[in-house]
Image: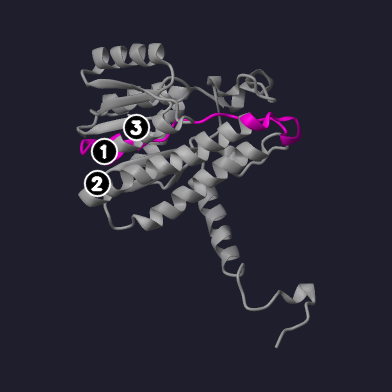
Amino acid sequence: MSEATTTGLAVISGASGGLGEPYADQLARRGHDLLLVGRRQDRLDTLAARVAKETGVNAEVLVADLTVESDLRALEERLRTDQRIEVLVNNAGVGGLTPLVKADLAEVTTLLQLNVTALTRLTGAVLGSLVERGTGTIINPSSALAVNLLPSGSAYSGTKSYVLTFTQGLHQEVAGTGVRVQAVMFGAVRTAIWDGSWVPLSSLPEEIVMEPAEAVEAALAGLDAGELVTVPSLPDVADWDAFEAARLKLAENVSRRHAAERFAVAGRG
């Protein structure tokens, strides 16, 4: 990936694991100072020190558990008030490929808190400042499972479908403001999010599992290309365009004055 000359602070939630490290590496190489947010102090400190040494950017650490209200509020306040922030990567999240009937519902609650509630609140916290300044980028990692549903992933797929449609709606909201948003529909990526899953990573064919650095590099290339939705493994973007066109065509008929004739419902007239 070519070096960029952008400046400003990039905030990466969930930076102590998963895709957080490659996002930190690649945004730092693009010239961004970093605020690395996560639960594990040791991993954050190690990542911050390495990235700062290798790239020369400033890398700050904020230890926070985004399922804890006080920690979430503290990060929201930083996002509202720090005028240096140019990029927010809502990377914090958990997996949950477990049939709902067998799931620990407390863990499902955590899934919803991180994948939906925290992402929405952090986006809302930074959005006003970005719109006021007329610049900035919000990156929301989604998943291929937002559209490729599995019997063991109803709750997880539901959260990632939310991320996708939330980002698409937000794109319309910020049109003309100078703020960019992107949803990234990652497929299977070799990260610890699979640990303890009903579907272990080792059960997947190697040919469908991408390395984290490559996945993030493709995601950022999609951002550079102006994509609202990036699917790093998709060979032909025309397939996504066709999917969207079908959705928009369907939308023309999802709300009408009368029920469709195929239901033979009384009361038409």
- Residue assigned mark 2: 135
For residue 152, side relative to residue 10 (left or right):
right
Going by the numbered disc 1, the residue's amino acid type is Glu
Disc 2 + disc 1, Cβ < 8 Å = yes
Give me the residue at 60% from left, 64% from top.
250
The amino acid on which the numbered mark 3 sits, given as a three-letter code, is: Ala
Q: Which residue is mark 1?
A: 86
User: Furthest residue to the front?
Assistant: 70
Image: magenta residue range: 78-106
Horizontal side, residue 121 vs residue 163: left or right: left
Residue type beneath disc 2: Thr
Measured from the top left, where is residue 97 in percent x and y? 66, 30
- Assess disc 2: are there few (<14), some (14-19) or many (≥20) residues with their C-alpha within 10 Å of its C-alpha: some
Residue positioned 32% across, 42% down in the render = 137
From the viewer's side, name the closer residue of 4 and 158: 158
Foreground disc of the pair 2, 3? 3
> Could you classify mark 3 by the number of other residues whose Cα lies within 10 Å: few (under 14), some (14-19), or many (20 or more)?
few
Structural crowding at the residue carrying mark 1, measured as other residues with C-alpha within 10 Å and reported as few (<14), some (14–19) or many (≥20): many
Q: Quadrant of the C terminus?
A: bottom right
Using residue 242 as the reference point, say whether residue 76 is left or right of it: left
Query: What is the spatial separation of the Cα atoms under label 2 and label 3, in whole angstroms?
Result: 23 Å
**On the image, numbered disc 3 is attached to which residue?**
74
- Quadrant assignment, res 209: top right
x and y percentages locating residue 44 in the rendered image: 37, 16
Q: Is residue 145 above or below residue 197?
A: below
On the image, the x and y values in percent for residue 222 come to 40, 40
The structure residue drawn at horizontal position 29% and vertical position 58%, both measured from the top left corner, is: 176
Mark 2 or 3 closer to N-term?
3
> How many numbered markers are drawn?
3
